[in-house]
Image (tube, grey):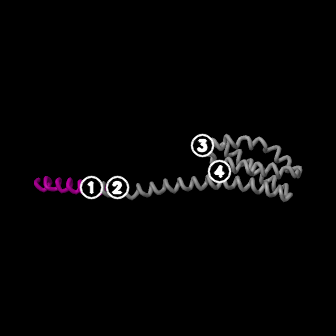
Amino acid sequence: MSENWQSKPKTTHWMRRATIYVALLVLVFLLGLVPMWLKSRECSRSFAEAERQLTLARMENSLAAAAIGARRGDYELARQAASDFFTSLGTETSNGVESALSEAEIADLQPLLTRRDEIITLLARADATSADLLSDLYASYCTIVKR
């Protein structure tokens, strides 16, 4: 019977020691996880900002391509580029919080969307005045979206 009594404290001592080791392992794991989690958050923010800048640059490039195409007399290319710009602009203005544009920029860019049909029609008709309208539109866009 004395052997039974002696083995219980050894088992309890071993269990306590195992619990301490497990707790230390969890603590070490968490100490390694927290810096990685913080770095991941930082990278996510940087990635989101890069995506935002890329979206704005693509929109600007589409509008610039439309203006240059119209100036060169390539109205079909200009029409397609202008259509891409207006589609992107419409998407970004309707995305709300997920938009690459701020609320103030969205409000300021709304009037540009109203000229969509007029500009697309002029480009489809190969009208030379579309080049001036696209140049003005480009200047307005760049003024509003001061990157």
Distance between the Cα atoms at labels 1 and 4?
58 Å
From the image, state whether disc 4 or disc 2 is nearer to you: 4
Around disc 2, counting alpha carbons within 10 Å, would you say few (fewer than 14), some (14 to 19), or many (20 or more)?
few
Residues marked 4 and 3 touching at CB (< 8 Å):
no
Q: Is residue 67 magenta?
A: no
Place residue 74 in its image quadrant: bottom right
Residues marked 1 and 4 touching at CB (< 8 Å):
no
The part of the chain drawn in magenta is 1-22
**Residue type beneath disc 3:** Val
From the image, state whether disc 2 or disc 3 is nearer to you: 3
**Residue type beneath disc 1:** Ile
Q: Is residue 46 left or right of residue 92?
A: left
**Residue type beneath disc 4:** Lys
**Residue type beneath disc 2:** Val
Residue 56 position within the rendered picture, expressed as x and y whole percent measured from the top left: 66, 52
At mark 1, the secondary structure is helix
Query: Which residue is tagged 2?
Result: 26
At mark 2, the secondary structure is helix
Residue 114 position within the rendered picture, expressed as x and y whole percent measured from the top left: 77, 41
Around disc 1, counting alpha carbons within 10 Å, would you say few (fewer than 14), some (14 to 19), or many (20 or more)?
few
Q: Which mark is residue 146?
A: 4
1 or 2: tag closer to the N-terminus = 1
Query: Which residue is tagged 1?
Result: 20
Q: Which mark is residue 97?
A: 3
Distance between the Cα atoms at labels 2 and 3?
38 Å
